[in-house]
Image (tube, grey):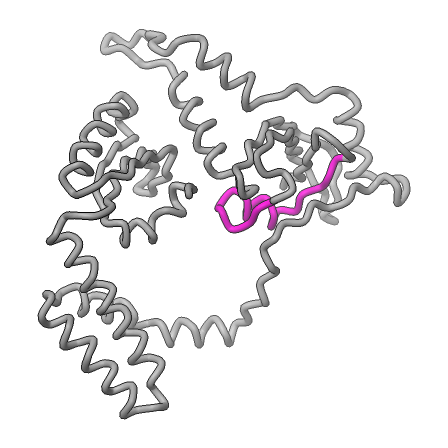
Amino acid sequence: MSRHYLFPNEGEPLRMSLRLVEGLIFGKDTLPQYAGTRQRVLSATLEFDEAKKPTRILRTEPSVWVFDQDGGIRQGLHEALALAMDILPTPARDGTVVELRPRTKKQKLEKEFRWEPGKAEIDRVISDIWPKGKADRLKAAEGVAKRKPPLTYDASRALDEASEGFWKIEHAIERLKEPSLKGFAFGARQRSEANPEEGSLFRAIAEMAERRLEILRRRRVGKGAWYALVDVTRWDDGVGTSISNHHERCEGKAAAIAAARRLLAAHADKFAEDITVEAEVLTDLEWQDRRRDFDLD
């Protein structure tokens, strides 16, 4: 288990809960007070005894978090990870290792995303982990995400039962062509009026059909805003983890296809035995579902 600490450029260090750290990493939380800044972070991995009390620090990991204009860190994490991937040595066919990446990228990684904690910072962390008085405990950093209400066993079971057939709804809608989608949406809204108790459910599937109809229309027309996407994914035992992703906004489908080819060529060197590089194009409506993965706009 680890403890996480933020050392602001100004002010006292702050302790960060695991909930906050995970929220920042997965784009669920932000720290707006640090928007547009670079902040030092120190994570300490601890060893615990049977009573779950920390006994010693196994290792520390310093890093620099780059906060975007909203106080999020995902884009900065992606940049650091992509930079780390770029400096990995590339094995040659004869088994030797050839250094293809410029040394400047390693220097950039160390300069922009790493820092060296001194004795004062380490001592401050130690005092928080093993406080001798109230003054030793650091204040906690607070994100903006609200605490989630507990999901009880009964609530979880009921939610599973209620959503068990959702995939059938989506599958049924995606099979329909434009004329049928129009009739589906109209019929669902009629049933919402005829069955008030289930009205909200019928209105929801009507909205799903109307959204699907609009996506098909935009794909057919090929005009307006489109997005070219390239995702670099590392695979481990069939489980993929996105290590970097790139996108470009375009005017029209043809321009998006050309941009996707260009992005694919630019990042093809990242392809490896356990790494895939994939491209796709999306309408701006579909992009709304994917933009969080790219942590932009």
Identity of the residue drawn at 36% across and 38% down: 242
Is residue 272 visible in the rendered image? The answer is no
Identity of the residue drawn at 53% across and 39% down: 69
Percent position of residue 260, x then y = 21, 34
Percent position of residue 51, x then y = 74, 49
In the image, 199 versus 15, the foreground residue is: 199
Is residue 19 visible in the rendered image? The answer is yes
85 lies above or below 295: above
Quadrant in which residue 37 is drawn: top right
In the image, 127 versus 1, the foreground residue is: 127
Query: Over which residues does the magenta segment extend?
Result: 13-31
Q: Is residue 147 magenta?
A: no
Percent position of residue 119, x then y = 78, 21
Q: Is residue 22 magenta?
A: yes
Quadrant location of the N terminus in the rendered image: top right
Percent position of residue 116, x then y = 66, 19
Q: Residue furthest right?
A: 133
Identity of the residue drawn at 60% across and 29% down: 38
Quadrant in which residue 180 is drawn: bottom left
